[in-house]
Amino acid sequence: MTQTIAPRLRTLVLLLLAAACALLAAAGPASAHAALTGSDPREGAVVDKAPAQVSLTFSESVSMDDDSLRVLDPKGKRVDDGKPSGTGGTTYSVKLHAGLPDGTYTVTYQVVSADSHPVSGAYTFSVGAPSDTSVSVSAQGAGGGFVGGLYGVGRYVSYAGFAVLVGGAAFVLACWPRGSGVRVVQRFVVSGWLALTAATLLLLLLRGSYTGSGKVADVFDLGLLGEVLQTKAGAALISRLLLLAAAALFVAVLFGAYDKREDEERRDLTFGLAVGGSVVAAGLAATWAMSEHASVGLQAGLAMPVDVVHLIAVATWLGGLTALLVALYRGPADTPVPALAVRRFSRVAFGSVIALVVTGTYQSWRQLGSWTAFTDTRYGQLLLVKIGLVAVLVGVAYFSRRWTAQLAEAAPAVAGAARGAGKASGSAAVQAAAKTAGKASGNTSAKSSGKETGSGNAKVAEKGSGAAEDSGGSRRAAQLARQRAAVDAARQKRQRDADPNRFGLRRSVLAEASVAVVLLVVTTVLTQTEPGRTEEEAKAAGTSSATGSAPSTGAVTLDMPFDTGSQNGKGVIRVELDPARVGANDMHLYVERPDGTAFDIPEVKVALTQKAQDIGPLPVVPDHITTGHWSASGVQVPMAGDWEVAVTVRTSDIDQVTVSKNAQIG
C-alpha cells in the first residue's frame, strides 16, 4: 500500500511546488502602494505658457530626495531645480527654470511610499504645441531588475524562516516537549533562525539599491546603507536583527538546558520559555507590521497589533505543521511522535485558524473597502486565492484530526506490540551475548591447557595470544550488539510505518504542508501588492482628473478619401482629434496618396459644425509640421454632441474639394 501511494504523494508535492514557483515568477517587482492621483500640469496637457513648477499628488505620503522628481526637456536635459518640496503630506512640487521654450516635456518620479515600497512613473505635457522628444517614458520601474528580483527572494525567505522558527518552537513547547531532544526537530528550528537572519541581512544590504538606482554596485555603498538605516524600513530590519539575537538565546535554552531537565523541572521552565518566546515572536512580527501595509492608511493604530496577531497565527499553524511533518517522516524510529502531541497540535492549529479568520476579515475590509475590489483589483483576486487555499487546508486538517483520533485508539495495542518486540529483542541480545561469552570461554580454556604442558617461553607467548583472543571476542560481541540494535530499529520502523493510522496521518499532514507552501507564497505576494482600496481610489482620482469639466470619449480618427479632379489630385486625409472632448483639443491631419505615401498639398482647412444647435462652422487653420502632416493645438469645442468635421483640400491653384464626416465629441 505504501509503495502504491508514495508516487502519488510525490506527484502532489511536485505540482504544488510548481504552482508556488509560478506564483513566485508572476510576482515581479513590488506594485506601487502609493498611487499618483493627480498632477499639475496634468498628463498630456498642452499649456499656453511654461508653468513655474510641476506638482504631483499621491494617495499617501512618500519620501523624496533631490533626484526623486525630475522634469526633462525634449532633448533629455533637466529643467528643474532638483529640490522637491512637500505641500500637505501627499502633494510635492519642483520649480522649473524660467523661459522654457515650446515643446514636449517629460516628468519622471521615483519615490518610496510610506509602507516601504518603491514607486516610479513618468508622463508628458507640452508647452505651446507637442513636439518630438528623445526621452523614453517606458523605462524599467523601481524595484525591478536583478536587485529587485533578489530583494523579492529575500522577502520570501524571511517569511518562511519566521514561520519555521516560531512555528517549530511553538510545536515543541506546546505539543511535544520531548521533541526538544530530537535532532531533526532541532535542525529544523535552527534552520528557520539561520534563514531569517541571512534574509534580513540581505534585505538590509539591498535596500538602498532596491529603492534607488537598482544597480548591483550600490549594494556595497556604505553611504547609501547609512541613509537606509535612517528610514522606517531600515529601522525595522535592524530591530529584527537585534530580536534574532534574543531568539538565538531562546533556541539555545530550548535545545540545551530545557532538553536536559526532567519532566517536573521541564514544566517549570516551560512557562518562562513560553513567555519569553512569545515576546520575541511578537517583536519579530512587529518589524513587518511597522513597515508594511498595516503602518499606513485607515486605523493604523489598530491595524498594526492585528497584523502582529495575524503573522504569529500563520507562523504557529504553518510552521508547526511543517515541524510535525518533519518529525513524522524524518524522526528516529525509537522516538515516534505520540498521538497526544498530534492532538495538542490539532487544538493549537484550530486556535490559529480562528485568529486568522478574525484578523483576516478585518484586514480584508481595511485593504479592500468594497465588494467589487475582490474581482476588480489584483489584491482582491489574490485574496480570493488565499481564502480558497485556507479552506482547502482546513478541509485536509479535518482528515488529519480523524487519523489522529484513530491513532489514539490504536495506541495501547501498538504499545503492547512494541513491549513484546522489546522483550524479544532483549532475549535475543542475552542469547547472543551468552554465545559470544561461551566462545570466549572456550578459547581461554584451550590456552590454559597449553600453559600446563608448554615451556616458560611458550607459556608467556600463549598468555599474550589468549589476551588477544579475549580482546577480539569483545570486539565481535560489540559489533554483534550494534548489528542487533540496527536490525531491531529497522524492524520497529517497519512496524511503525505499517500502522495504517500513522501512515494516513503522515499522508494528510504531507498534503497540508504542500498546500501551506503555496499559501505562504500567496501571502508574501499580497504584501507586495497595492491594496485594493488604494488602487480604486487612484482609478477614481485618475478618471476625475482626466475628465475635468466634461466627460471624454477618447481620441477620434476620421479617414476621408478625396479627389480634386486634377493630376495627382487623389488621396486620403486622416483627421485625429484628441481627446475629443468639450474644451481644448489637439488636431492632427495626415495627407497620403492612394498607395499610402505621404505628400504635401498647397492648402488644407478644417471647419467644425453642429447643425442641431446651429453652431458653426468654426474654422481651424492647422500649421504645416512636416511632409503630409499638419497640426493645430487648442482647438475649442464649445459643447458635446454630433459634430460635422469638414476638410477643404486644395491640390493646385484652382483644384480643391471639401469632404466631411460626422463625429461624436464629448
Image (spheres, rainbow, N blue to C red):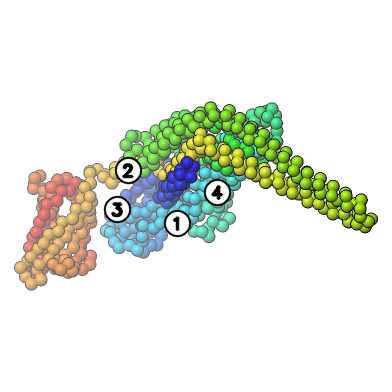
Q: Residue at x 13, y 47 (%)?
A: 642
Position in image of residue 455 (x %, y %): 94, 56
* Residue contact at pointers 3 and 1, CB within 8 angstroms: no
Q: Amino acid at mark 2?
A: Lys
Circle 2 is placed at which residue position? 539
Mark 2 or mark 1, whichever is nearer to me? 1
Q: CA distance from mark 2 to mark 4?
A: 35 Å
Q: Nearer the viewer, residue 221 or 478?
A: 478
Instruction: Please tell me which residue lies in front, 426 or 253.
Output: 426
Numbered disc 4: secondary structure: helix
The residue under label 4 is 199
Q: Look at 56% across and 57% down and name the residue there.
A: 221
Q: Which label's residue is closer to the chain start, 1 or 4?
A: 1
Whole-percent x and y of residue 656?
7, 65
Circle 1: element type: helix
Residue located 49% across and 53% down the image = 150
Q: Is residue 253 depicted above or below 221 in this figure?
A: above
What is the C-alpha distance between the residues marked 4 and 3?
43 Å
Residue type at mark 4 is: Ala
Q: Position of residue 215 (x, y in %)?
A: 49, 58
Residue in the foreground of this view, choosing between 358 and 176: 176
* Pointer 1 residue: 145
Name the amino acid, label 1. Gly
Query: Disc 3 vs disc 1: which is toward the camera?
Result: 1
Q: Residue furthest right?
A: 456
For the residues marked 1 and 4, what is the alpha-carbon distance in whole angstroms? 18 Å
